[in-house]
Amino acid sequence: MDRNPVGWFEIPVSDMERAIKFYAAVFGHKLERHTLPALDMAWFPMHPDGMGAMGSLVFHKEFYTPSANGALVYFTAFSGDLANELARVALAGGKILVPKTKISDEHGFMAVILDSEGNRIALHSRR
């Protein structure tokens, strides 16, 4: 297989402005907002030829409900150590559910947080 099987993910939000501020504060990314007739989206930075899936925050009252149950999306900690991103979670309006935890020597570390909208997401880093 020459491609990752997951191409796109959408994280439901109930307050787009608050969610954009949360993800920008924790991960340091500038999200690109797109308001369409049926829904409001904010895209995470994407590199079409890069590894990993593309994704966005999405507000659509009838179609999406933020939830701490269901699929778990893992974000790469671009700082290299997810402890840096975890340090910004509470200040941005989130909560740490699972602290930095070693997966293995080969796979590094993970943590699980609750975002400003009530979604459970995870972080990953090699150190």
Image (cartoon, rainbow, N blue to C red):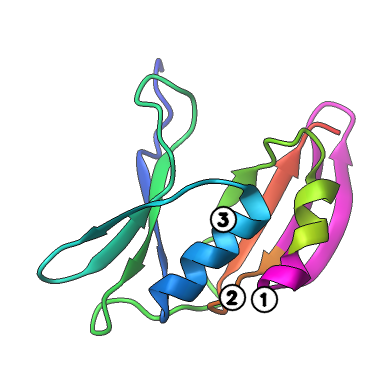
Q: Is residue 26 left or right of residue 29?
A: right
Amino acid at pointer 2? Ser
Q: Which mark is residue 116?
A: 2
Residue stretch in magenta: 89-112
What secondary structure is the stretch in magenta mostly built from? strand
Q: Position of residue 66 (x, y in %)?
A: 46, 78
Amino acid at pointer 3? Ala
Amino acid at pointer 1? Gly
Q: Quadrant of the N terminus?
A: top left
Query: In whole angstroms, how far apart are the C-alphas of marks 1 and 2?
Result: 5 Å
CB atoms at circles 1 and 2 under 8 Å apart? yes
Q: Which mark is residue 93?
A: 1
CB atoms at circles 1 and 3 under 8 Å apart? no
Q: Residues within 10 Å of mark 2 (few under 14, many from 20)?
A: many
For marks 1 and 2, the one nearer the N-term is 1
Q: Secondary structure at mark 2?
A: loop
CB atoms at circles 3 and 2 under 8 Å apart? no
Q: Secondary structure at mark 1?
A: loop
Residue marked by disc 3:
24
In percent of the image, x 73 and y 65: which residue is there? 89
Q: Considering only vertical position in the picture, is 35 above or below 105?
A: below
Q: Is residue 33 magenta?
A: no
Q: Considering only vertical position in the picture, is 32 above or below 98?
A: above
